[in-house]
Every structure is written in C-alpha cells, then in structure tokens.
Image (cartoon, rainbow, N blue to C red):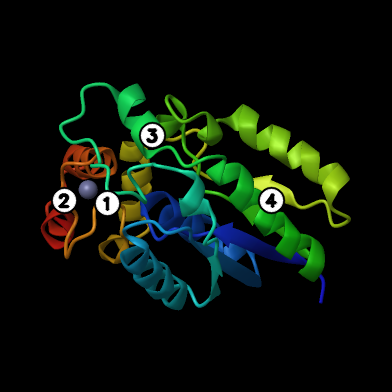
Amino acid sequence: MSSSNSAVILLSGGLDSLVSLGLVRNEYEKILALTFDYGQKVFKQEAAAAEKISEYYNIKCEIIKLDWLKNITNTALVSDNEVPENITDYTLSMKSVWVPNRNGLFLNIAACYADSFGYSDIIIGANKEEAATFSDNTEEFVNRVAAEFEYSTLVKPKVRVPLIKYDKRKTVELALEHKMPLDLVWSCYNDGEKHCGKCESCIRLKAALQACGDSYFINRLF
Ligand SMILES: [Zn+2]
C-alpha cells in the first residue's frame, strides 16, 4: 500500500491533536492515528479520547505501547510526583512534566509507519504557545526532524504542523469556528473523571475557552 494522499497523525486526544486533525481531515483519503501508552497516569482518559475522536473523523487509531519509557523517567506525568498547580513559572512546570525526547521518539515512530506503509505525511499538534517553553514544539525542531527523515526513510514523509503559528486561544477559536467536538478531548495531566482545572495544560485550555467566550465546553470538561 502506498498513497500520496495519506497521513499518520500523533493523536494524544488533547486539544492540539484534535484541532490539527480537524483542520486537515478533508485533505486526506486515509489517516492513521497513533496514540502512545508510555505509562502516563492519564493513559486511560487519553486513549478513550483518541478513540472517540478517531471515530468522529472516521479514521483508524492504533495504540503503541512504550512500556520502557516510564522506567527511565521521574516525570510527574508517570510517577507519584505531583503535577505542578497554580503555575507562575512555566519553565519550572515544563521541567516537572518533561518526558525524555517524547516528540522526537513519537515522530520517529510515525516515520517508521510512513516508511513501511507509504503514508506521505506526518501530522503533529505542536504549537506556538507551548513552543515558548517546550523546545520540542518549535518549528526549528520539527524542521530538523523532517530533514532527518530524508536520510532515515525511503518514503521521506513530510511533517505538517497545522498549529505552529497559533496559540491556544486561536486554536480554540478554530475549533469553535469549525464546530469540532471539543467535549471529546482529554488535555489534563491529572487522573480523574473531569479535567482538574489546575495543571498547566488545564490552565491553558480553560483560559483559551474563556477568552473565546465559551461556557458550554468549560462546563462539560471541568
Ligand atoms: Zn488538569
């Protein structure tokens, strides 16, 4: 199977991956979503969100197990360490939830699928807002990894980053404008029934929804 009109998307089930998918869905005949289980405390919620989003957009979703990753990190996303709340310093928060080479690894796994099955593009939900503290969300990082694929694959997939110029407010604005199912996402770092509203990811999402004048999704998610 080889198709020049197909893509692999990194789908965590969070806001950025949903909106990235929603923006490009109609451009492709076929999209494969990859969702990773690296021992994160919210894997159950993320996998459920990714599956519902995949169903909504009529694409296939595959779970990739990375059992070893949690064994080499103490990040608050996988360990008993508490996820920072009421954040004033995003750099400190970033360090406590940093997973070693996560986007680098995920993009390379997507490239394995692209190279094996002929997917022409890889899509990642990196974005301008988080790029300020997460270096693996920057345009420069993505361009460099894409350049690596020129050598490490035969298919040479293109890497697309639909949100690279957008902050969370613009991302939510696009979601609302295109009537995307924001109530399906799981963006929270903490395990629970609903989004905690206190972790970095929740603070960013909630602020963006508020800035867009939304109350419907705030009530559904938090
Ligand atoms: Zn949260």
Mark-to-mark CA distance, 4 and 3 = 25 Å
Which residue in the structure is indicated by mark 4? 108
The image quarter in which residue 12 lies: bottom left
Badge 3 vs badge 2, beta-carbon distance below 8 Å: no
- Residue 130 appears at what percent x and percent y? 41, 33
Mark-to-mark CA distance, 2 and 4 = 31 Å
Disc 4, SS: helix
Cβ of mark 1 under 8 Å from ligand 1: the answer is yes
Which residue in the structure is indicated by mark 1? 188
Query: Nearer the N terminus, badge 4 or badge 3?
Result: 4
Query: Nearer the N terminus, badge 1 or badge 2?
Result: 1
Cβ of mark 2 under 8 Å from ligand 1: the answer is yes
Label 2 sits on what residue type? Cys
Disc 2, SS: loop
Label 1 sits on what residue type? Cys
Which residue in the structure is indicated by mark 2? 196
